[in-house]
Image (spheres, rainbow, N blue to C red):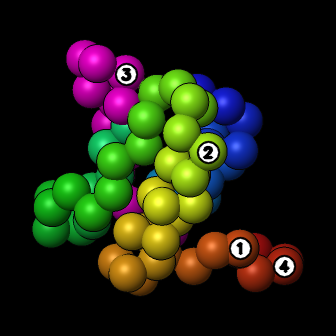
Amino acid sequence: MDKDTKKVLAEAERQGFTVRTTSKGHAQVRNADGQIVAVFAGTGSDHRGLKNGIAQLRRAGFVWPPKKGR
């Protein structure tokens, strides 16, 4: 997993989401209700993968980029 994806996932955890890695290496992000709101690929082969994942998270209430001073 690349460093940009790791930063997004760390911020998602800080904002109350749960991140779990599947047996295939994908990162699943779940909301407080346990519903999967986004899935990130374990490899960076898709140039839109990170942006698509961030868009899915934003629809679930994720704030990106994080506000300064938090």
For disc 4, the marked residue is 68
Earlier residue among tags 4 and 2: 2
Query: What amino acid type is highlighted by mark number 3?
Result: Gly
Asked if 58 appears above or below 29 in the picture, the reply is below
For disc 1, the marked residue is 65
Who's the residue at 25% across and 17% down the image?
A: 23
Query: What amino acid type is highlighted by mark number 1?
Result: Pro
Label 2 vs label 1, nearer the camera: 2
Q: 14 or 8: which is nearer to us?
A: 8
Question: Magenta stretch containing residue 21, yes or no?
Answer: yes
Instruction: Give the magenta part as a residue range.
Output: 14-26
Left or right: 59 in relation to 63: left
* Helix, strand or loop for disc 2: loop
**Quadrant housing the N terminus:** top right
For disc 2, the marked residue is 47
Is the magenta region chiefly helix, strand or loop? loop
